[in-house]
Amino acid sequence: MLQRIQTLYLLLIVIAAVVLLWQPVLSFASAEDAGVQRYAMLSAIHGLQEQALVDGAEFTPDSDMQPLTLNGTWGLLVTTVLIALLALVDIFLYTKRILQARLNIFLACLCVGYYGILFMYVWFAKMNLGMDWHVMPWAAVPLVCFVLTLMATRAILKDEALVRAADRIR
């Protein structure tokens, strides 16, 4: 049945993961050098977007400045898309509750893996770019998805226990 509470939890995961695709999860800032301070934002779809500031006025980097690059930012994109797709597929597996619960466990592992990938990007950025990093509020979305996944799994297993109890009575 699609009107179960775990469907709502899984739908919230899909919506949160789709919104997370476009939102920045990390910001990087360099030390001010000759009136120029460089900022960069990391998001799943856009990768590392650079902004450079001179005395508070935004400008585009000229030929004197090396562009900031962080290679391989596709990991966040793939993980976020997989979270959204697996939660969406999981909604329609309501007749196979055990498979649905197992898929939820994998989904929870993906949510935790998102932070592992994010840590790798922070480490590479710190080593290669020499910039300080700051966590944006949108970085908490995978944690919310993790909690929602656990709540959905609990509801699915509760439904399975109810169905098995009803089968024993017959």
Image: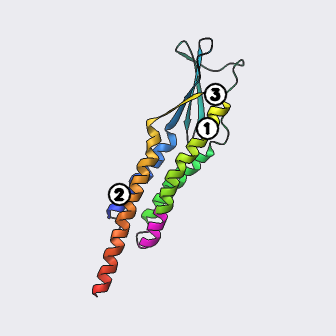
Location of the N terminus (image quadrant): bottom left
Mark 1 residue crowding within 10 angstroms, few (<14) / some (14–19) / many (20+): some
Question: Mark 2 falls on what kind of element?
Answer: helix
Q: Is residue 35 above or below residue 150?
A: above
The CA span between labels 2 and 3 is: 43 Å
Q: Is residue 16 visible?
A: no
Percent coordinates x, y for residue 160 in the rendering: 36, 73
The mark closer to the camera, 2 or 3, is 3
Q: Secondary structure at mark 1?
A: helix
Outermost residue to the right: 63
User: Please, what is the three-letter code of the amino acid marked with disc 1?
Assistant: Trp
Q: Secondary structure at mark 3?
A: loop
The image position of residue 46, as x and y in percent, is 58, 38
Q: Earlier in the sequence, mark 2 or mark 3?
A: 2
Q: Is residue 44 left or right of residue 153?
A: right
Instruction: Give the residue type that dot 3 points to.
Output: Gly
Determine which residue is flagged by label 2: 8
Q: Which residues are magenta?
A: 93-104
Name the residue carrying label 3.
130
Q: Say which residue appears at 36% left-offset and 61% top-offset.
A: 6
